[in-house]
Image (cartoon, rainbow, N blue to C red):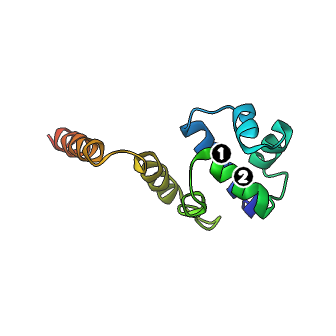
Amino acid sequence: MQNIKEVVGARVRELRKEKGMSQEELAHAANLHPTYIGKLERGERNMSVESLEKTTKALGITLEQLFKYIQPSNQDEDSNIMEQIINRLYDKSLQEKRTILKLIDTAFELKGK
């Protein structure tokens, strides 16, 4: 079972990578040390409220967005996959979401044949 530090760290890593940022870039933007970001992402450091605020601002997200899809550590693989899909769609435009939905429908239609 993952502890909360590991869960939050993994979420920060996921969001950082989605933004195309390196740990160093995130650290610079958040005015934090790169080593701190690395330890945070590995779940080795507790994050202060101040560091939490700096990190979310540097990622261009809200606290709600950081914690929105964090589930209890006993989530199953299906829930984890759904969470990843939702996270990838979160910042997409309505048109992009409609296109992706059509692609999913088409894939299911092809699979059914």
Q: Which residue is drawn at 54% across and 39% down?
A: 18
- For badge 1, the amino acid type reads Ala
- For badge 2, the amino acid type reads Lys
Can the viewer see residue 14? no
**Camera-side residue: 42 or 64?**
64
Q: Mark 1 points at which residue?
A: 58
Q: Position of residue 86 (x, y in %)?
A: 43, 53
25, above or below 79, in the image: above
- Disc 1 vs disc 2: Cβ atoms closer than 8 Å? yes
Q: Mark 2 points at which residue?
A: 54
Q: Where is residue 79 in the image (x, y as percent from the top left)?
A: 49, 59
**Camera-side residue: 81 or 60?**
60
Tell which residue pokes out farthest to the left in this image.
Answer: 113
Q: In this view, does 45 lie to the left or right of 95?
A: right
Number of other residues with Cα within 10 Å of mark 2, as a class: few under 14, some 14 to 19, many 20 or more? some
Q: Quadrant of residue 14?
A: top right
Q: Position of residue 80 (x, y in %)?
A: 52, 55
Q: Which residue is drawn at 29% across and 47% down?
A: 97
Q: Which residue is drawn at 58% across and 65% down?
A: 71
Q: Which residue is drawn at 74% across and 46% down?
A: 41
Q: Quadrant of residue 106?
A: top left
